Amino acid sequence: MLSEQNLNQTMLNAEQLSSLKEAIGTYSPLQLAWASGYLAAKSEGTSVASLPTASGAKASSTLTILYGSQTGNAKGVAKSLADQATAQGLSVDLKSMGEFKPKSIKNVTHLLIVASTNGEGEAPDDAIALHEFLASKKAPKLESLQYSVLALGDTSYEFFCQTGKDFDEYLSKLGAKAITPRVDCDVDYEEAAAAWSQEIIAKTKDLLGESEVASNVVAMPTTGAASQYTKQNPYSAELSVSQKITGRDSAKDVRHVEIDLGESGLTYQVGDALGVWFENDEALVDELIATLNLSASESVNVANETLTLKEALVSALEITQTSVNFVTFWAEQSKDKALLALAQDKNAAREYAANHQVVDVVKAAPASVETQVFVDALRKITPRLYSIASSQAEMEEEVHLTVGLVEYDENGQTRSGGASSFLGKRLEEGGAVKVFVEHNDNFRLPSDGNTPVIMIGPGTGIAPFRAFMQEREATEATGDNWLFFGDQTFTQDFLYQVEWQGYLKSGLLTNIDLAFSRDQAEKIYVQDRLREKAAEVYAWLERGAHLYICGDMSRMAKDVETALIDIIAEHGNKTNEEAQQYLKDLRNAKRYQKDVY
Ligand SMILES: Cc1cc2nc3c(=O)[nH]c(=O)nc-3n(C[C@H](O)[C@H](O)[C@H](O)COP(=O)(O)OP(=O)(O)OC[C@H]3O[C@@H](n4cnc5c(N)ncnc54)[C@H](O)[C@@H]3O)c2cc1C
Ligand SMILES: Cc1cc2nc3c(=O)[nH]c(=O)nc-3n(C[C@H](O)[C@H](O)[C@H](O)COP(=O)(O)O)c2cc1C
């Protein structure tokens, strides 16, 4: 803490303050931002020999930060990195890869990439163009480029951090020099990302300092009014409704959830997702503590916070998802032969982790463990995302979700997903839930309301399309709307049936095609319905329709894409490659968008 004397020394005296005020009185906000960086650099004794004038900075003085982000994590890391770099007196150009012209990479000298991986080892939507360009023959030599990559991913996926790895490889092949080795982060990326940010800023400062331009500061681009509520600082909202919308005899339990955003001022657009923080089930926590023979009241440390073991397991640590690292840890801890063998085989370990919660891993191979050692082996809890199922134009301060409860049987016991059971079962109506809005500019209605849209959303994939329809109705958009929906049975699983029938009756919904897989002997899915309507689907695309897919990533989205390529090839008289290119062009024109998970 500063003593009073130190405080006086650090503050300006009245005369100094008055001359400072006079000097900056005429500055624009941009000039003020520039000046603050200049002063920060000066206070650190950085060279100011080649300060830029308003006529522009030297190209080589700028640190370019590009992010590729599907659900906001990489974007958040990149923004915080840019803030820190700016505060350290660096000139920063922060952009989403989607806003960056791939060809202009040849003008960049210092580049930091923060990229997540999406799909199955695929680049996030905003990174696709740059990713493709750097891998193509068109990519220029980049011998004067220095770079570093922070890759975000999840070890439970086969292609861990693939996009970050690709960027690193492509840049290196083009002759660029890595400033620091790439860092690959798992789901709890915060600590590793902070350490990488600190190191890379220090190194970049040295590099830019060598060319005597380290004090060059420009204001960061503004990205619109940001809410004060974020992933790190969520809003404590109220759960107003959690209602089962599948029938009594359905094999699935899907909940329509309404959350009251109250006075938060939180805004969302249709296509966005809601981030939901949750608490683990106390009964599951008790079962885990009892299995481990530990004491619920023992103090543990999680991210520099002291909690009881029970508190930590309820609100700070993941126990419904198991990581491969935890499986390996527990194999070593228990010395269980089967688990040790499994841990040697990456694919088998991944598969086992995906199908067993922490409590079932420790039950299968009993061992004693020290409390803090066990806590350190678990991941920090992460919020889950849910596609928003309402339009604020109609619902104002409410936000609606369509939540499928994750539930399965493990040795006669029901195991549930952490967040879905919190929202759907444990939290009482009126209870508090911490939320934030995750904007998704890669899943947006066409700006022209006359444009037709085709929406393919089986199961909970229906959620954003309910929001789309509310928005199209509220904005009196005249474009045609076509929905493909599917699930197991018509009577039990037709989500929001009454609403869809109402839209059909009013004419807002032009076409609806339904695929209920278990209502007849042979299985029928949305991709089959698309094929049945192939000529019409192609005609809609030819007249400018935007195409959307939401829901299951592992099978549905792939099968639908294959069907679309076949449809385009057949009705557009194209080869398979040409049809793929047609779909790529639609994607690049933002006419083909996916929200799959
Ligand atoms: C952008 C985005 C949008 C999304 N939108 C929606 C949406 O609109 N609606 C929706 O419902 N979900 C949506 N999701 C998925 C959602 O975020 C959660 O992943 C989902 O609700 C499960 O979370 P959970 O915490 O309940 O389960 P977790 O606690 O995350 O999972 C429980 C564990 O159980 C395992 N498991 C599941 N089934 C079995 C089984 N049969 N046998 C053995 N193990 C099993 C899982 O692999 C997992 O390890 C979306 C995801 C993303 C990324
Ligand atoms: C639908 C989906 C697919 C994913 N696929 C992969 C993958 O193939 N490999 C990987 O390492 N991580 C994968 N991840 C994990 C993300 O990369 C990770 O959660 C990351 O922090 C997300 O960052 P973002 O929010 O910037 O997109 C996937 C996540 C989602 C939601």
Image (cartoon, helix red, strand yellow):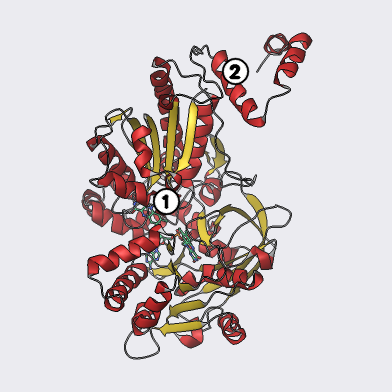
For residue 39, which numbered disc appears in the image?
2
Q: CA distance from mark 1 to mark 2?
A: 35 Å
**Badge 2 amino acid:** Leu
**Pointer 1 local density, CA inside 10 Å: few below 14, some 14–19, many at least 20:** many
- In this rendering, the answer to whether 449 lies above or below 183 is below
From the viewer's side, name the closer residue of 512 and 569: 569
- In this picture, residue 179 sits left or right of residue 92: left
Quadrant, the C terminus: bottom left
Q: Residue furthest front?
A: 55
* SS under mark 2: helix
Q: Residue 411: percent from the left, percent from the top?
A: 37, 68
From the viewer's side, name the closer residue of 63 and 406: 63
**Badge 1 amino acid:** Asp
The tag earlier along the polypeptide, 1 or 2, is 2
Residue 330 in view of the camera: no
Q: Residue 505: percent from the left, percent from the top?
A: 60, 87
Q: Residue at x 32, y 65 (%)?
A: 582
Q: Residue furthest bottom?
A: 520
Give the quarter the ligand 1 occupies. Answer: bottom left
- In this rendering, the answer to whether 397 lies above or below 381 is below
Q: Residue at x 36, y 51 (%)?
A: 128
For residue 558, which numbered disc appears in the image?
none
- In this picture, residue 431 sits left or right of residue 288: right
Q: Mark 1 vs ligand 2: CB under 8 Å?
A: no
Quadrant, the N terminus: top right
- Which residue does the numbered mark 1 point to in the structure image? 126
Q: Residue 133: percent from the left, percent from the top?
A: 30, 47
Residue 78 in view of the camera: yes
- In this picture, residue 395 sits left or right of residue 446: right
Q: Mark 2 vs ligand 2: CB under 8 Å?
A: no
Q: Residue at x 56, y 77 (%)?
A: 245
* SS under mark 1: helix
